[in-house]
Amino acid sequence: MIRINYNLKPADLSEKLKRFWELSGEKITAIEHEYDVAKGSPVFTAAGKYTTRGWTEWTQGFQFGSAILQFDATGDTKFLEMGRNKTVEVMAPHISHIGVHDHGFNNVSTYGNLLRLMQEGKIEVNKWEKNFYELALKISGAVQASRWTPIKTGGFIHSFNGAHSLFVDTIRSCRALMLSYKMGHVFQGEGDVKISLLERALAHIKATADYSVFYGEGRDSYDIWGRTAHESVFNTKDGNFRCPNSQQGYTGFTTWTRGLAWAMCGFAEELEFLTTLSDDELTAFGGRAVIENYMLRAARATCDFYIEHTPIDGVPYWDTGAPNLHKLGDYLSKPANPFNDFEPVDSSAAAIGAQGLLRLGRYLISKGETEAGEKYWQTGLTVLDTILQEPYLSTDHNHQGILLHSIYHQPNGWDYVPEGSNIAYGESSMWGDYHARELALYVQKIIDNDTYYTFYNCLNR
C-alpha cells in the first residue's frame, strides 16, 4: 500500500513544479513544431515521439488544453495563443460528435479552460469570444447527454461501444452536462420535450456508483471495497444490469487502474460541484443528502482501494489483477518498477488518481472530517511528489512526453515495447501528460494562493 508522507506540504514541491513547467513547455513546443497533424490526433509516444492510434478522437482536447494549462501556470502568452487558435481551428467537430462519450475530455479541456481563464481575469474579457466558448459548452453538454440508455434504476451515457455499455471513464464527461445546465441551456428531444441535463448527469453518476464501483456487499458480496470495473454491460431490452466487463483492463473481475483513477477524480470533482447547486435544484433527484451519500461513498471506496492496492510510492501497475504480477513478489511493499520483466506500470493512473485524492481530502476537511481528509490529501501530495521526479518526469529533451511510463491498451498490445524488453515502458500519453499538468496546476494554485482550480470556474460569478 502507499506509504503516505504526512509531513509533505504543497510548498515543498515548489522547485520540482518549477522544473516540471520548464520541461512541459519544451514538450508542448516540440509537438507543435514536429508532429504531423495529417496523421490525426497525437495519442501516445513510440520511441519518444508522439504518434496516433485510431479508435476514437478523444485526445485532441488534451493536446490543446495542455497549452492552455501551460499559460495558466507560467503566464507565457505563446501557449495561450497556441491553445486558443487551435481550439478555434480544430475543435468544432468535437462539439457535435455524437459517437463518443468523451466530451468532457475534449471540450471542457479546451473551451472550458479558455472560458475559465476569462472568468478568472487571466485573459481579457471579450463578449463575443465569451459567447463563443459558452455556446460550445452548451451544445457539447447536450450532444453528450443524447447518448442515453434508460435502465430500471435511471439511465447512463453509453460508451462508443453501444447502448449496452457504461464506461467508468465517462463520469468525467458529466462535467459537460453540468456546465451546459448551469449556463441555462435547454436540451430538447422529440416533440420539443425538454430534457433535464442535471437529471441525466446525476443519473449517470449514480449508475457509475451503483454498477462500476464494488463495495463488498449485496450484489457484489463476493468482491471487495472500492474495486471498479471498466465497463458495465446492460440488457437494453429490459434495462437490467448483466455483468462487469473490461476493454482496457485484464478482466471485468480485476481493476484496470486508470479506470479506477477516472472514478476517483470524477466523483471527487462532482462532489465539489454539488456545492454550487441549491437544495431546491436537487429535491427532485432524491435531495442533497442522498446524492452526496452515493457520491461520497464511491469516492471514498475508490480512493481507499487505490491506497491499499498501489505500491508504496503511489504509482500503480496497469491492472491490480494483471496475470504476471505474482512474478514480482511482494510488489506492494516496494516502489513500483517500470523496468520490470512482467507487467507495466501506468503513471497516467497516478496523475489522474492523485487529483481525486486531493479533491476528496480537501472536501472532507471542509466538512469537518479532518483526519480522514488529511489522509487523502497527503496521499495525493505523496503521489505528485513521486511523478515530479525521475523515472517518471521526462527530462530527455528529445522525448516529446512529460510523464513517462504511461500505458494505453495492454490487452490490444498497442503500446511501444523497447527492443530487448518484455513489456512496454518509457512512453507518454496525451491524457497522462494533460492530467499531470492539471494536477501540477492544481497544487501550484494552492501554493500561490490563487483561485482554487475547478472545472466550473468557467461559470459566471
Image (spheres, rainbow, N blue to C red):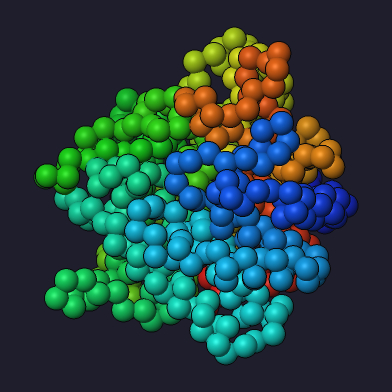
Identify the residue at horizontal 45%, vertical 41% (top origin).
55
Side of 322 relative to 446 (left or right): left
Q: What residue appears at the point 35 percent right and 65 percent down from the top-left corner? A: 143
Direction front: furthest residue: 38
Q: Is residue 167 visible?
A: yes
Q: Position of residue 233 (x, y in %)?
A: 27, 38
| Residue at 62%, 88% in the rendered image | 126
Q: Is residue 293 left or right of residue 64?
A: left
Residue 172, given in percent of the width and then of the height, sits at: 47, 55
| Along the viewing direction, whichever of 328 and 339 lies nearer the viewer | 339
Quarter of the image for residue 89 reads bottom right
All told, the count of numbered labels is 0
Lateral position of residue 78 relative to residue 235, left or right: right
Does 279 appear above or below 304?
below
Side of 440 where 157 appears, left or right: left
Q: Residue 295 in the image: x percent, y percent?
A: 41, 54
Name the foreground residue: 346 vs 313: 346
Pinpoint residue 201: horizontal percent, then vertical percent: 35, 62
Residue 373 appears in the figure: no
Dividing the picture into quarters, in which one does residue 362 lie? bottom right
Quarter of the image where the C terminus is located: bottom right
Placement of the N terminus among the 4 image quadrants: top right
The answer to whether 140 is drawn above or below residue 31 in the figure is below
* Residue extending farthest left: 238
The one nearer the camera, 142 or 156, is: 142
Q: Is residue 256 above or below residue 7?
A: above
Q: For the point 50% across and 20% down, which residue is it?
A: 322
